[in-house]
Image (tube, helix red, strand yellow):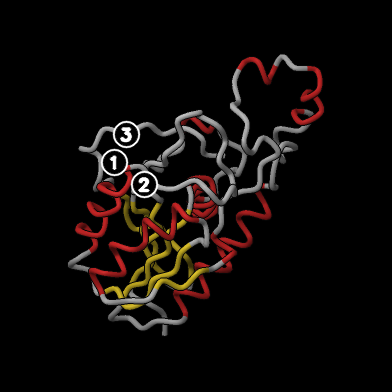
């Protein structure tokens, strides 16, 4: 028996005035718009039979999970396996200046891994383990929600689609507070939908790994 569906929710806009890579740094919270985005996603999920809520332990994901928890009367279960991807540029603004800095050149020797952060394969494996375990914890009449981060969610998408994990970050279809849904069909994990409930809220999406 598996859950009817699993929804991977990305956190809302982060308060990041310096425009740095926030990675796993603990102090990065949702902005006011980010809280509105999280509420919009909770509203979108409201008619789903959600009975379990899991979230990355970082502040921005825990805050994004709260409106969902309040909507369904659930506790938020923290899970380290759905945390943000590790990145060597944490706390730093990344741009052309970084690419031109000799001290950082070694971090770019293998973009296929990538050499500047947690390996795509490691992110994929820990996320799929968490997703499949969560699905197997439910039943065919109820849904599970996991609140996570852009790159981890995108790794699940790419692996389910059978696409290479290496990709152009600018082409990720994983907006702030978006919902990517999955289910098990004939013993296989498949993607069943994508929604952007907070699309009408203007936001700045910078700082993700």
Asked if residue 77 is positioned above or below residue 27 in the image, the reply reads below
Q: Are marks 3 and 2 in contact (CB under 8 Å)?
A: yes
Q: Quadrant of residue 116?
A: top right
What's the distance in space between the residues labelled 3 and 2, CA to CA?
9 Å
Compare marks 2 and 1 and give the one earlier in the sequence.
2
Q: Name the spot of residue 97 as percent of width and height, x first.
A: 65, 15
Asked if residue 56 is positioned above or below residue 184 in the image, the reply reads above
Q: Are marks 1 and 3 in contact (CB under 8 Å)?
A: yes
> As drawn, is 128 to the left or to the right of 52?
right
Q: Name the spot of residue 9 as percent of width and height, x first.
A: 38, 56
Disc 2 residue crowd, few under 14, some 14–19, many 20+, Cα 10 Å: many
Q: Name the spot of residue 11 as percent of width and height, x first.
A: 40, 50
Q: Quadrant of residue 109?
A: top right
Q: Nearer the viewer, residue 18 or 111?
A: 18
Dot 3 corresponds to which residue? 203
> As drawn, is 201 to the left or to the right of 181?
left
Dot 1 corresponds to which residue? 33
Compare marks 1 and 3 and give the one earlier in the sequence.
1
* Numbered circle sitting on residue 12: 2
Q: In the image, what residue occupies the spot 25% across and 59% down?
A: 42
Asked if residue 88 is positioned above or below residue 143 in the image, the reply reads above
Q: Quadrant of the N terminus?
A: bottom left
Q: Nearer the viewer, residue 93 or 151?
A: 93
Q: In the image, what residue occupies the spot 44% across and 74% down?
A: 135
Compare marks 3 and 2 and give the one earlier in the sequence.
2
Q: Are marks 2 and 1 in contact (CB under 8 Å)?
A: yes
What's the distance in space between the residues labelled 1 and 3, CA to CA?
7 Å
Disc 3 residue crowd, few under 14, some 14–19, many 20+, Cα 10 Å: some
* Numbered circle sitting on residue 168: none
Q: Nearer the viewer, mark 1 or mark 3?
A: 1
Q: In the image, what residue occupies the spot 48% across and 50% down?
A: 149
Q: Nearer the viewer, residue 131 or 148?
A: 148
């Amino acid at each position: 028996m598996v859950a009817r569906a699993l929804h991977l929710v990305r956190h809302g806009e982060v308060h990041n005035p310096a425009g740095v890579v926030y990675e796993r740094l603990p102090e990065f919270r949702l902005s006011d718009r980010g809280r509105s985005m999280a509420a919009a996603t909770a509203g979108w999920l409201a008619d789903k039979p959600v009975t379990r809520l899991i979230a990355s332990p970082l502040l921005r994901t825990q805050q994004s999970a709260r409106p969902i928890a309040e909507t369904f009367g659930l506790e938020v279960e923290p899970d380290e396996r759905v945390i943000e991807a590790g990145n060597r540029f944490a706390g730093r603004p990344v741009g052309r200046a970084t690419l031109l800095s000799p001290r950082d050149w070694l971090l770019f020797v293998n973009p296929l891994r990538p050499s500047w952060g947690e390996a795509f394969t490691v992110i994929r494996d820990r996320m799929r383990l968490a997703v499949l375990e969560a699905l197997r914890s439910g039943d065919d009449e109820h849904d599970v929600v996991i609140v996570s981060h852009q790159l981890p969610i995108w790794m699940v998408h790419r692996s389910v689609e059978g696409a290479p994990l290496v990709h152009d970050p600018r082409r990720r279809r994983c907006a702030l507070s978006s919902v990517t849904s999955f289910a098990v069909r004939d013993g296989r994990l498949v993607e069943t939908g994508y929604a952007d409930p907070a699309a009408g809220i203007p936001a700045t999406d910078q700082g993700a790994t």
